Amino acid sequence: MMQSDREVVVVTGASAGVGRAVAHAFARRGARVALLARGEEGLRRAAHEVEQLGGAALFIPTDVADANAVDAAADLVEGTFGPIDIWVNDAMATVFAEFASIHPDEYRRATEVTYLGAVHGTMSALHRMLPRDHGAVVQVGSALAYRAIPLQSAYCGAKFAIRGFTDSVRTELMHNKSRVWITMVQLPAVNTPQFSWCRTKLPDHPQPVPPIFQPEVPAETIWWAAHHRRREVYCGGSAAAVILANKLAPAIADRYLARTGYKSQQIAGKPVSLDRPNNLFDPVPTLAATHGMFDDRATTRNVQTWLTTHRGITIGAVVGGIAAASGVWRIVRP
């Protein structure tokens, strides 16, 4: 798609975490950014940051589980900023718990926000993009869209569903020779407020499985994916490694996660408070921020994504290395 200094972008889940960092990334390029999430106070602060970074901001309190609300938000965006160029689906909600202890209403809510929220956003985006034959939809995925782990069945199920739904829609767009593009960015563990405000039934505080990346890393990858026609982008070497390992040896991964998955997702010796607020059904405005509580353990380095986004250089280096090695072999062989 053609880039514009003032492209119009919609970001769901924009009040915190990766969504907020994505809004920042587009704002730095001067975009007009519409921020959608439930929590008005977090959205208001995120919108102020977008404007401070050089973008234009419009925040719209929206529950993405409500298809009509999402479509109304899209109408407001186009009425204010003009035609939508890029739509980023990032909103999510989850429950950290064994499946047997999750109530049906909890599971339904996590699925409606995380999976159906992406469906609703994609519907609203495509209804506007297809007649213009222009635009891009970016689904914010996860390595857990390929490799499910214990204690996160609702989230993993939703991410698997987004991947399948996205693949289906992509083939329909290709069949119709549409220039509208849909892609998915598979994320690693990220330092977001998710772990401080998700609903949890674990004895100790939830944590991402290391290595942990700062939200700015996937945000830059998502910005790149929105402007390049890649089917899918892996963010972080750990995400790529998890996906590859699961393709090669899923049964071994099952056994490994059964043994380590409970401990690795909890902070030992840090019990969860009984009065801890959670955002499954209502926002938690006091915790809305870009970063979570793991700044001291998170990194901004991302070699794997650099290699992905510089594929020509990477392939050239590999081919050159093989050619050089072959030349040396011809010289030294007896």
Image (cartoon, rainbow, N blue to C red):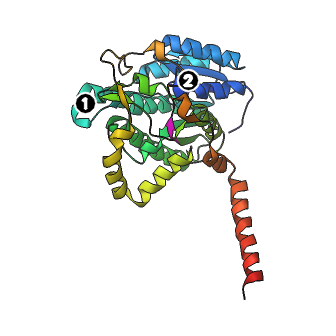
Quadrant location of residue 82?
Answer: top right
Labelled disc at residue 123: none
Q: Would you call the spot at circle 2 few (<14 residues within 10 Å), some (14-19), or many (20 or more)?
A: many
Q: On the picture, is 29 further left or further right than 269?
A: right
The chief SS type of the magenta part is strand
Q: On the picture, is 6 further left or further right than 244?
A: right
- Look at label 2 and name its amino acid: Thr
* Residue 135 percent across, percent down from the top left: 61, 35
Q: Residue furthest front?
A: 269
Q: Are marks 2 and 1 in contact (CB under 8 Å)?
A: no
Name the quadrant of the N terminus. Answer: top right
- Look at label 1 and name its amino acid: Ile
* Residue drawn at the location 59% of the way across and 27% of the way down: 21
Q: Residue under label 2, please give it.
A: 290
Q: Residue furthest left?
A: 100
Report the front residue among 263 and 183: 263
The residue range painted magenta reads 186-191
* Residue 161 percent across, percent down from the top left: 39, 41
Would residue 176 be visible to someone looking at this image? no
* Residue 37 percent across, percent down from the top left: 49, 19
Q: Is residue 49 above or below residue 113?
A: above
Would residue 37 be visible to someone looking at this image? yes
* Residue 275 percent across, percent down from the top left: 32, 14
Helix, strand, or loop for circle 1?
Answer: loop
Query: What is the total number of numbered labels drawn onto the structure image?
Result: 2
Q: Residue under label 1, please give it.
A: 102
